[in-house]
Amino acid sequence: MSGHSKWANIKIKKGKADAARGNIFTKIGREIAVAVKAGGPDPANNSRLRDVIAKAKQNNMPNDNITRSIKKASGELSSVNYEEMQYEGYGAGGVAIIVTALTDNKNRTAGDVRHLFDKYNGSLGTTGCVSYLFKKKGLIVIDGEELSEDDAMMLALDAGADDVVGCDGVYEVYTLPQDMHSVKDALEAAGATVLSADTGYFPDDFITPSENDIGKIQKLIDMLNENDDIQNVYHNANLPEEEEEE
């Protein structure tokens, strides 16, 4: 197993925070729309859609909402086309931040993101200005109560994973982005309980902000996550856990 995991700190999906703000269904609905456009409306033949539906159910999204989102994206109902966007910049103290979005209005979203970076002592940069500090990976979280460390490691590596980390009652299984779906399917076929699966950006190293910068960084992250267009916020700040939890 690798060393101490930072998964809890980087918050690939701030599900609890989004649910508290009432926007998680909106964000998942957009993910469903993009998945359907990319691979069709049948989850049996669309692994991306299958994973988004699993996430929707984990967040207690009603089946009617899921079905309606799929119908919208497949053209059975009026549909909005969402475009995938990525923004990069620095927060207070030089913290590197990557923001991913699904938007139907690029100008609006870019303006909102720039405004928030400026408001909280950050600066929005050009494409590539911080992404070299991160690696894109797949992350599959499986229930740690059902498997020993040795069994989890063997099962994951046999399925094609790159690494496994035990953390807080779960195992975090890391993969190449393109291998995430196949590894997830292999783990489930072997009897593991998959709690979540997604791809994201993981920093090579973390930096510890000053006490003066922590509040500004956390506020920027929170305000970005409140925006319906924003899907994920990745950063390399080593923030106190109590600051991150809602």
Image (cartoon, rainbow, N blue to C red):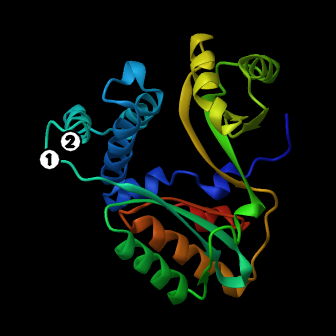
The answer to whether residue 187 is above or below residue 112 is above
Residue 34, labelled with which disc? none
Judge left or right: residue 76 versus residue 69.
Answer: left
Residue under the point 62% across and 69% down: 127
Which comes before the other along the chain, label 2 or label 1?
A: 2
Amino acid type at image mark 2: Lys
- What secondary structure is found at the residue carrying circle 2? helix
Image quadrant of residue 110?
A: bottom left
Query: Residue at left 68%, top 43%?
Result: 137
Numbered mark located on residue 78 in the image: 1
Q: How crowded is mark 2: few (under 14 residues within 10 Å), some or many (20 or more)?
A: some
Query: Is 244 in front, or is 117?
Result: 117
Identify the residue at the far top of this view: 190
> In the figure, residue 171 lies in which quadrant?
top right
Total marks shown come to 2
* Residue 145 in which image quadrant: top right
Q: Position of residue 35 (x, y in %)?
A: 39, 38
* CB under 8 Å between discs 2 and 1: yes
Task: Report crowding for label 1: few under 14, some 14 to 19, many 20 or more residues within 10 A (C-alpha).
Answer: few
Amino acid type at circle 1 is: Ser
Q: Is residue 217 above or below residue 82?
A: below
Q: Which residue is drawn at 62% across and 34% down?
A: 141
User: Residue visible at 58% across and 52% down?
Assistant: 12
| Above or below: residue 115 compared with residue 145 | below
Observer-nearest of 227 and 214: 227
Q: What element carries label 1?
A: loop
Vertical placement of residue 2 versus 27, above or below: above
Where is mark 2, residue-wise?
72
Quarter of the image where the N terminus is located: top right
In the visual, does 48 lie left or right of 42? right
Taking depth in this image into account, of 111 and 239 the one nearest to the observer is 111
Marks 2 and 1, how far apart at CA: 6 Å
